Image: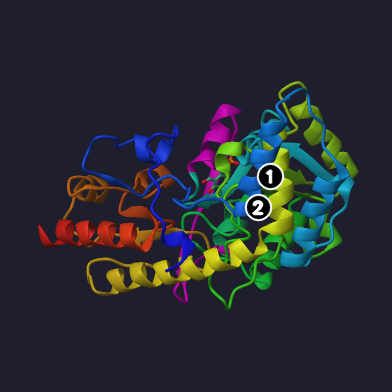
Amino acid sequence: MSFLDIEIDRTTSHCEKWNKYKNQDIIPAWVADMDFKAPQPVIDALLKRVEHGIFGYTGMDDETYKAVINFIKRHHNWEIKKEWIVWMDGVIPGINITCRMLEKEDEVVTTTPIYPHFVTATKNTNKTLIQITMKEIKNRWSIDFDELENKITPKSKLFILCNPYNPGGTVFSKDELKKLGNLCVKYDMLICSDEIHADLVINEQAKHIPIASINDEFAKRTITLMAPSKTFNIAGLQSSFAIIADKKLRVRFEKNLRGLGGGINLLAITATKTAYKDGDKWLSELKNYLRENLKLVENFVKNNKKLKMLSCDATYLAWIDCSKLDAKDPYELFLSHGVGLSEGERFGNNDFIRLNFGTTKKNLIQILNKMQKAIDSQ
Ligand SMILES: Cc1ncc(COP(=O)(O)O)c(C=O)c1O
């Protein structure tokens, strides 16, 4: 038995995921957080900090910077500098701030389906959004570079990339990232690279590459967004950061952040520092566990000829094609049989559902059994 098998009641903890269906016979498998306790060193460090008892204005320390810099070097072979880091209380604010940096008439380009807050950020800032439909190539979701080049206009000024890709689970290869980066150079577009899932690569053949680490030309135009929140299951502590190598671009970003927050709170600092320093062992066990969970999901899909799923390299989110089911709305079908998934429509395709498999095996098996009953009921 793994420590990740321990079931914890989350309904008494302001938990968005479980409270959505509180007191209903529905198992939640939607929003992207996991049902696992954070690494013990993180919990111990937070307890110690809380016991200190004074929670005044707090500043960032060198040790936390060092923990981030070393973690990124160790896991992604990318050498970043302290001054490139801009702290924020979420990756979503980072995407919104990037959109605010643009001029009124500028267009934003991204893929579809996509994590909904990419679309929301462009709506919040009144930007025109161009979306490139993700294509199935060799059993994985890939960018259609011809469609991308055809759709770019002289007003296109920003590409928002999700790597690893939510909802499809792709870890983009160096070749794909080079193609994308070269197009952004050719058409003089900024890149906002949301890499929040970078540490959760579970396909042992795949390797996460930060697009800004490929060459100086890409680094110069890229705002990379990272966080310990998905990696160590500490999203409620709200810690994240942008990495911006180019000084001019960084100053533009910081100017748009000014007065709206920035910085992270003292518990977020404590958790971030400890997780990046002492969380590797926990992370490695987590990835093994998620790999086994993914197998359960893949077998379930294989055994149901009306379902389809492409290779999922990373994240704990399965993007499942339900178009062959005789259901008007697959989300409703599974909900009526006791499973609360994410609606594909929120990501841009209502033939799909997204299943969060970041939970105990026991719970995942219950979820899959209920989903099976839903399919058999048709
Ligand atoms: C791709 C992506 N970006 C950003 C976020 C949310 O980031 P944050 O909670 O730091 O704002 C998520 C959460 O699911 C995500 O999947």
Q: CA distance from mark 1 to mark 2?
A: 6 Å
Say if 23 sits above or below 1 in the image: above
In front of the other: 337 or 14: 14
Q: Quadrant of residue 145?
A: bottom right
Residue 239 can be seen in this image: no
- Quickly name the residue at label 1: 45
- Quickly name the residue at label 2: 41
Q: Position of residue 131 (x, y in %)?
A: 52, 48
Image quadrant where one finds the C terminus: bottom left
Relative placement, left or right, of 89 versus 27 is right
Residue sticking out furthest to the front: 51
Q: Residues within 10 Å of mark 1 (few under 14, many from 20)?
A: some
Q: Are marks 1 and 2 in contact (CB under 8 Å)?
A: yes
Residue sticking out furthest to the left: 377
Identify which amino acid the numbered label 2 is placed on.
Pro
- Span highlighted in magenta in the image: 116-145
Q: Secondary structure at mark 2?
A: helix
Image quadrant where one finds the N terminus: bottom left
Q: Secondary structure at mark 1?
A: helix
Q: Position of residue 319 (x, y in %)?
A: 40, 59
Q: Position of residue 206 (x, y in %)?
A: 59, 74
Residue drawn 58% across the image and 35% down it? 122
Query: Tell me, what colour scheme is on the image?
Result: rainbow
Residue drawn 64% across the image and 39% down it? 47
Residue drawn 73% across the image and 40% down it? 269
In front of the other: 282 or 186: 282
Magenta segment includes 165: no
Identify which amino acid the numbered label 1 is placed on.
Ala
Quadrant in which ligand 1 is drawn: top right
